[in-house]
Image (cartoon, grey):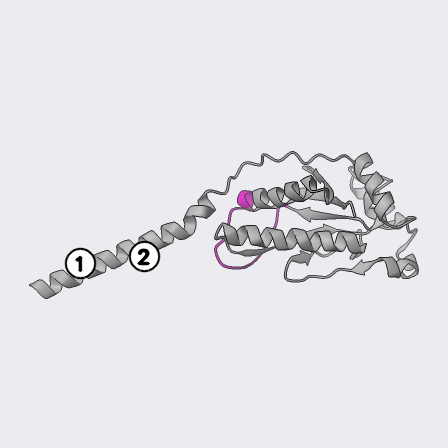
Amino acid sequence: MRKPFSLILQTFLAMILIMAFVCACHHEAKNVPETFPFTLADVNSVQLMAAQEHGLSHTLKSREQIDGVSDRLVHIGTCQYYRVDKLTHSVPYLTRGASELLETIGRDFQKSLKKHKLGNYRIIVTSVLRTEEDVRRLMKNNHNAVKKSTHQYATTFDITYSRFDHISGTRATLKQLKYLLGEVLSQLREKGRCYVMHERQQPCFHITSRR
């Protein structure tokens, strides 16, 4: 009788250890808030001043003019830190400062996920450099679009908070992911790296580099 009892006891203890391990792995993830407390409300006029100071010296009439300023631009593409979405009204170019900012955001976001024992995700970039032609086309379909857009200076990009690219590991809720991304943006904003507008009608963070 002792052998079966001993086996049952060992099995019971093993189950307790497994449950304790699982709870420990998810403890920090549960501590990630699902409410969004960050005030990220840098209006267009503020972002435009930074864009004109640090971005292209003039706006581009069409995409054909990109070659003429290619020495000031960095082509961005999907990498380990972010995914570039299918772009319809912009092209994947940024100034070097904005490109470095985007990579920092993606890297810091993944560090935060790791800290909270969540899976590996990439942020998704939904809008980048716009020409005057792009802006005109966008204004026909999007009433929130403005004629004098910071996107025209290659210093600005949008990151959606309605979707994240899950690569591997534990899945987090959309609200948790938005919180962690907002935390990263708030910290970089406080350091003077960027201006951020929390857009609601178009679910994205509108971000302008200050370098």
Residue in the foreground of this view, choosing between 9 and 107: 107
- Horizontal side of 50 relative to 185 (left or right) equals right
* Residue 123 visible in image: no
For residue 74, what is the image quadrant?
bottom right
Image quarter of the N terminus: bottom left
* Residue 77 visible in image: yes
Proximity of marks 1 and 2: CB atoms separated by less than 8 Å? no
Sequence-wise first label, 1 or 2: 1
- Horizontal side of 153 relative to 186 (left or right) equals right
Whether residue 94 appears in magenta in the rendering, the answer is no
Residue at image mark 2: 18
Q: Secondary structure at mark 1?
A: helix
Q: Which residues are magenta?
A: 161-176
- Placement of 74 over or under 35, stated as above or below: below
Residue at image position (91%, 49%) is 57
The percent coordinates of residue 48 (x first, y second) are: 83, 40
CA neighbours of label 2 inside 10 A, class few (<14), some (14 to 19), many (20+): few
Residue at image mark 1: 9
For residue 196, what is the image quadrant?
top right
Residue in the foreground of this view, choosing between 47 and 100: 100
